[in-house]
Image: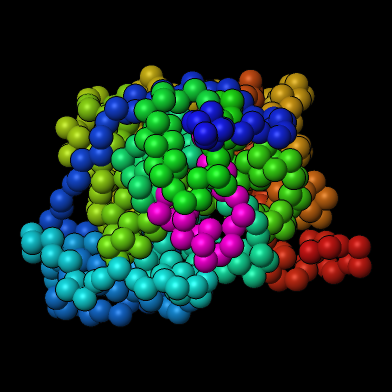
Amino acid sequence: MKTAKDIFLKPVSRIKGGVLVKDNKTTFDSVPKSLSVSRVVIPLLQHCTKPASAIVAVGDKVKKGQLIGDAGDATARIHASVSGTVTDISVRKIAPKEKAVCVTIESDGNDEWLETIAPPTVTDAESLIDAVFNAGLAGMGGAGFPTHIKLRSVYEAKAKTLIINSIECEPYITVDYRACIDFGDDIIRCIEALIKHIGFERVLIAEEDKKEKGDEQALIERIEKSEYKDIIKIVRLKPKYATGAEKMLIKALLGISLPEGKLPSDASCMVMNTSTAAAFGNYLLTGRPLVSRCITVAGSAIKEPANIIAPLGALISDIIDFVGGFEAKPYKLIIGGPMMGHAVDSTDYPVTKTTNGILAFAEKMARVKTETSCIRCGKCAEVCPMRIVPTDIYKAATDYGKPDINELVALNAQACILCSCCAYICPAGIPLVKGLDIGKRLVAKAKAKGAGNNGKCKESCDI
Ligand code: SF4
Ligand code: SF4
């Protein structure tokens, strides 16, 4: 007879690099509460491809779940997250350096779903990919890549392994942990549909070893009820920051190193975030598209850290008020986790499909190290999970305002996943990630232009 023990597999490979960070996860026990707001500001760009276009006009009455932004299948669809009236469609700042067209909806307070919403009919791979598209899914772990595009590519590549990423190694954030407890049914429903229609031959649910066992137990019980229980396994990985990054996970679980430019489908697998899987499982059952998400609100300046379910487009200020406001003056506000999130200058930004955390820190914890000169200790390169040399890339990207594109290409700057391990460990407090981000953008720009060698094409240049 099969026992719970049979559900576990061991990782096949050790991950090089990474750092041990204090996890500060104080919201494991916080059952997500739903927030209602009087107004949402929904960006038509909530994913990493092209923006959607508004298909509603100012003055229109909309219902929850109604399509309001679309641009064909090259992007993720956007739906109304409350019922009410469209009062504005205009370009707004959605992050300190990013703008997008946003649809503002004043809520009528009724929270009424569109009457035509019904569970999708899924009979094969095409109808399943259509369902993912209609659900408006984009990677909810932070990457924001439209899920239907990813799914089509793995289906065409006949990928055999589905990895459900529940690692969540960013400090403070506990949304995927809660998803395993609160939405285990939805997660397994999603997995079952993907096995049946896409043809995955095994599913590996990756999670951190140190988690309390509550989440695991709920999942184990649900897996044991599945007709696919023999091919759904849980793999526990030792806690180490950056293990949850896609390429790291593939290396640990499958033993395959994916070089820069290669996709998970090249390793015959697909990596799906736990919350994305839960959202799709819910869509299969209800036909309700992605209009809200779980967010961890925490940090030393937050009065009552908690997990909440917020409608997409809710403003950070409304969310912080909902958890009791600030405990102390916030000196640093971050959307996402402290390692890969983005510092923001106001609480006036809306949350999107990729917002998994809102963190606010009081003065002591917001202090940044004083920057001094590089002491060539090599620690940044030691911890880099992508095995590149952060300090050299930083120099090539920022040197006296004259970045060297060819040097950046030679140093493989594009491989950087902006995980912040190098900046975290640097004793000199050098803001390496800023330079690495600049370097990546410069190479991508040069690549798009089709020119390397600082603008002069050269045979040996591969961009
Ligand atoms: S931010 Fe980039 S360079 Fe720094 S450790 Fe991460 S992958 Fe390596
Ligand atoms: S860790 Fe900091 S000080 Fe050490 S080599 Fe890297 S950039 Fe220089």
Pick out the residue farthest to the left.
109
Closer to the camera in the image, 65 or 116: 116
Residue visible at 17% across and 39% down in the picture: 322
Q: Magenta stretch: give its range.
A: 188-208
Residue 159 is situated, as x and y percent measured from the top left of the image, at 65, 60
Q: Is residue 253 above or below residue 226?
A: above
**Location of residue 391 by image quarter:** top right
Figure check: 458 above or below 337: below
At 78% from the left edge and 68% from the top edge, which residue is drawn? Answer: 451
Q: State the image quarter where residue 14 is shown.
A: top right
Q: Is residue 237 above or below residue 109?
A: above
> In the figure, residue 363 lies in which quadrant?
top left
| Residue at horizontal 14 percent and vertical 71 percent from the top | 85
In the displayed structure image, the side of residue 325 where residue 199 appears, left or right: right
Q: Is residue 60 left or right of residue 386?
A: left
Q: Nearer the viewer, residue 68 or 89?
A: 68
